[in-house]
Amino acid sequence: MARNDAFFLKHWIEYYGSQLGKDNLYIFLDGTDQPIPENAETATVTHCERIPGQVVSAEKRRLTHLSNAAAELLKKYDLVIGTDADEFLVVDPECNETLQSYLSKLDIKTSVSGLGLDVGQKMEEEQVIDENLPFLSQRCYAVLSPRYTKPVVLAKPLQWGSGFHRIRGHNYKIDKNLYLFHFGVFDMKMVQDRFLDKDRMSAGWERHMKKRAKTITSITEKKALHGESVLGLIRFFQTIFRPVFAWNKPTLFGFNPVVKIPERFRKNPVV
C-alpha cells in the first residue's frame, strides 16, 4: 500500500514484476486521489479510502487491511509477499535463482524473513541517486538493522504487525539466502524532500523521518565492516536474540553495524 510514493512504487513494480510477473502484483493506493502508476500494466491496482490518523494508529489499520488482503490471496496462491514500496526482497546472487524459483523450493510452514539491510548514503562519497541506474550500483553501504529483518513472506493467513515487522503469535525464520533491502533513507535529498510532504507531516511523520535519517549519519561517520565476513554472524545473532517485550522480533540490543554491501550484490544488481 502506498501514498505519495510514485518514485519507489515505479521501481517496486519493475523489480517484483520481473521476478514474479506483473499480473501477480497487487497494489493498494491509500486514497482515491492517488494516480495509477504508468508502468502498472497488468498489476491489480485498488484505490482505497484514505486511512486517516497519526502514523502509529494509521499504520495498524493499514496492516490489518493488508493482512486481510493476503488471506484472500492465499486462497489462490501458495505464498504471498508483503512489503512497503521501498523494500526489495532479493535472493543471494550466488544462488543464481529468481525470487519465484527460490521461494518455490522452500518448505515454508508459516513465514520467512530476509536479513534486513537498511541502505544509506555515505555523504561526500556517494552522489544524489540517479533513478535511471540500479540502486545498488550507486550505494555501497548499509546498516544491518533487525528492524528490517521482516517476516514478509506468508504461507498461510496470519496477522502482520505494524510495518510488517512481525507476525502476531508466531516466531520468525531468517532464510540464509534472502535479504531485504530497505531504500527509504538512501538519499539525503529525498529525505529532505519528504519533509515537504504535507500529508506525511500532518500525520506525525516528522519525528519518524528524523529517526530513520540517522541511517545516513551512521553510514557517513562509522567505519564499515566487511559485509562478507559479518552477514552470517549477524543472521545468527538475530535468530537467537529477542527483545524482552517482543519474542517474535529479532534484536541486536543496540548493536547495528554499518557494513559494506558485498560486491556480488552490486556487480549485476537486480535492483
Image (cartoon, grey):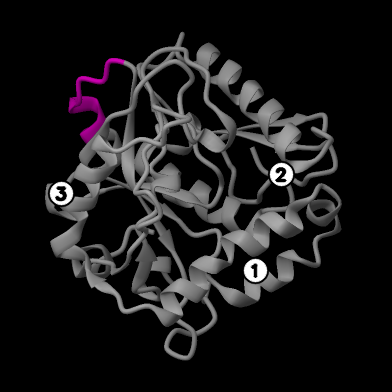
Which is more N-terminal, label 2 or label 3? 2
* Magenta-drawn segment: 101-109
Residue placed under numbered mark 3 in the picture: 96
Q: What's the distance in space between the residues labelled 1 and 3, CA to CA?
A: 34 Å
Q: Nearer the viewer, residue 7 or 201?
A: 201
Residue placed under numbered mark 1 in the picture: 191
Q: Locate residue 31 relative to residue 112 in the image: left or right.
A: right
> In the rendered image of this protein, does residue 50 appear above or below residue 229?
above
Discs 1/3, front: 1
**Residue 58 makes an appearance in the image:** yes
Q: Quadrant of residue 48?
A: top right
Element type where label 1 sits in the image: helix
Which is more N-terminal, label 3 or label 1? 3
| Residue 168 located within the stretch drawn in magenta | no
- Look at the image and tell me in which quarter the C terminus lies: bottom left
Q: How far across and down, in percent of the image, does residue 158 sit?
A: 47, 15
Element type where label 3 sits in the image: loop
**Residue 132 makes an appearance in the image:** no
Which is more N-terminal, label 1 or label 2? 2
Identify the disc placed on residue 88. none
Element type where label 2 sits in the image: loop
Q: How far across and down, in percent of the image, does residue 35 sit?
A: 76, 47
Task: Give neighbour class at mark 2: few <14, some 14-19, many 20+ (Cα, 10 Å).
Answer: some
Residue placed under numbered mark 2 in the picture: 36
Q: What's the distance in space between the residues labelled 3 and 2, CA to CA?
A: 33 Å
Query: Residue at position x 62%, y 28% from top?
Result: 63
Name the residue type under label 1: Val
Name the residue type under label 2: Ile
Q: Locate residue 269 relative to residue 164 in the image: left or right.
A: left
Task: Give neighbour class at mark 1: few <14, some 14-19, many 20+ (Cα, 10 Å).
Answer: some
| Residue 108 located within the stretch drawn in magenta | yes
